[in-house]
Amino acid sequence: MPYIEVYDDQTLQKISSYEDADDLGHKNKLFCTKFDIENPNIVYSGGWDRNLNIWDIRAGQGLQGTIYGPMICGEGIDVNPKTHQILTGSQTPDEPLQLWDIRTLGLIRTFDWKGKDPHGGSSVYSCKFMKPEKSAVFAVGSNKNAAKVFSVDTGEMLLDLTDMDPIIASSSVVACDTSSQGRTVIVGSATGAIHVKNITITLAD
């Protein structure tokens, strides 16, 4: 059974291990873990079993909650603790990019990835809140290879990078990141190519 281990990055000693988690622990391949930057005792994990688990790594705490749904297959978890939101990228073409409430464990929205293209579904491998305000999200996926930016508040698609550079869509897009000011996005493809693009997005007031 997949499990989580936590290590001290200074001493390289193991701090916690959840090999014997209860029935809500992971039951299939585990692909992503993410620390909460506001609370380093909290870790989020997800994989193929469609469980997004929330862990408290302090001794004896363990599993704190589970969101069922996202099928994580890459770096498909990001967290904005200031707004109590979790972003997930999923290998489910009909619900590839979703926003969740940490407090209620409920779904806030499913972003309309396909738009007007009925065949435009993607398996999202990587997703990020865009720095610095985190009022937009950036995600990339395959099957229908794409890299898109959405508004957190409205769910509106703000930018499709394949419109800027069709080469991005020529292979599976599996990794992404943004610059500290959100003006540059980085896309990694399965071929090993790295695409760096300067972007401008406009958010509704």
Image (cartoon, helix red, strand yellow):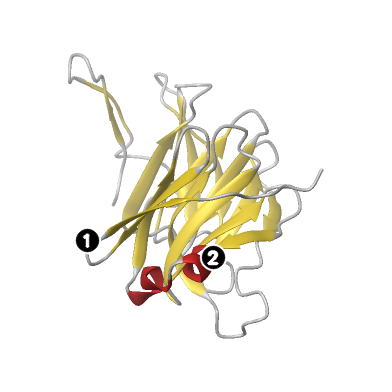
Q: Which of the 4 image quadrants contains residue 22?
A: top left
Query: x%, y% of residue 155?
Result: 71, 57
Q: Residue at (45%, 22%) from the top-left corner?
A: 41
Nearer-the-camera pick, 13 or 60:
13
> Which residue, given by chain and number where applicable, does mark 1 sit on?
192
Q: Residue at (60%, 38%) from the top-left corner?
A: 134
Q: Nearer the viewer, mark 2 or mark 1?
A: 1
Q: Residue at (36%, 71%) from the top-left corner?
A: 167
Give the farthest residue toward the left: 12
Vertical order, 29 against 190 (above or below) = above
Query: x%, y% of residue 68?
Result: 56, 56
> Which residue, given by chain and number where applicable, does mark 2 sit on?
96
Q: Is residue 2 left or right of residue 45?
A: left
Give the farthest residue toward the right: 205
Amino acid type at image mark 1 = Gly
Q: Residue at (55%, 85%) from the top-left corner?
A: 119
Determine if residue 200 is in view.
yes
Amino acid type at image mark 2 = Pro
Q: Which mark is residue 184?
A: none
